[in-house]
Image: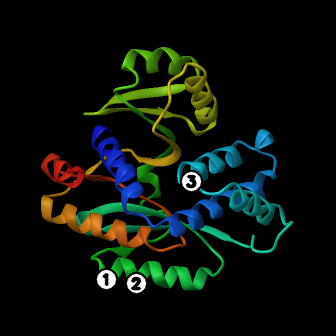
Amino acid sequence: MAGHSKWANIQHRKGRQDAKRAKLFTKAAKDIILAARSGGGVPEDNAGLRLAILKAKAVNMPNDKIDNAIKKGTGELAGGDLYETVYEGYAPGGVAMLIEVATDNKNRTVAEVRHILSKNGGSMGEAGSVAWMFDKKGVLIFDKKTCTEDQLLETGLEAGAEDVIDEDESLTVHTAPGDFMAAQQAFERAGLKCESAELSQVPKSLTPVDKAAAARVVRLVDALEDNEDVQNVYINADFPDEFLDELEG
């Protein structure tokens, strides 16, 4: 799934450059609230909360905001009433999409998501229409300058890593969701620091698109991610290499 991994790398870097801090904090806080609500407010006993906190710290979210989000999730503070769902749909070129949202008003959010899709050449799908095209995986991205494929394989395979994918400037490790935290901790103990680590929906296969359609898909993804209720957008597009190179540049 090299095409997907290269897009994930570019999206990771692009998101760090483009996103506004307040919006990043809002999304990170929702992740923490949901994790604390489902598994409790003690990070040592809640792997999901540990991951949400790590992601929040990666965007430089202040500790007091992290603590408040945990308390909202456990009910110690108001504001923890969030509804989670996944919308399925299609982007230009027949590209499948999964759109994860967390909202306090699902009627508002579904209307906004539907509007964004329609305005940008996409469409909402029925439940189950595209979910089968994706597998949930742990995804860890490493800079090639800091480690080798052999190092990742040696450490990762013992901790449940399923695959190491060689990209132009990075290496991507996939794990089963249940092995994700153990693999991440094994890499840390071995001194192998990853650029990003998250649970993601990885496409089973990719839908080829031409350069024009690729540009429209990216515009749609950007528009969705600009909505504060949208937590994650996953696609199965196979972009042309020249388009990815331009996007990265």
Residue 159 to residue 82: above or below: above
Compared across the picture, whether 37 is left or right of 195 comes to right
State left or right for residue 84 relative to residue 223.
Answer: right
Pinpoint residue 204: horizontal percent, then vertical percent.
38, 44
Task: Name the residue at the right extreme.
Answer: 76
Instruction: Give amino acid for label 1.
Output: Lys
Residue 121 placed where, x, y %? 27, 76
Nearer to me, 126 or 201: 201
Identify the image quadrant of residue 95.
bottom left
Residue found 80% across the figure and 62% down from its top = 71
Which one is in front in this view, the residue at disc 1 or the one at disc 3?
Answer: 3
Marks 1 and 3, how far apart in space?
Answer: 33 Å
Tell me the residue that label 3 is attached to: 60
Query: Mark 1 sits on what residue?
Result: 119
Question: Is 236 situated above or below 97?
Answer: above
Type of the residue with mark 3: Asn
Ranked by sequence position, the earlier of labels 2 and 3 is 3
The answer for how far apart the CA atoms under marks 1 and 2 are is: 6 Å
- What residue sits right under mark 2 in the picture? 115
Q: Which mark is residue 70?
A: none
Answer with the quarter of the image where residue 163 lies: top left
Asked whether the residues under the numbered discs 1 and 2 touch, taking CB atoms below 8 Å apart as contact, a structural biologist would say yes
Disc 2 is placed on an element classified as helix
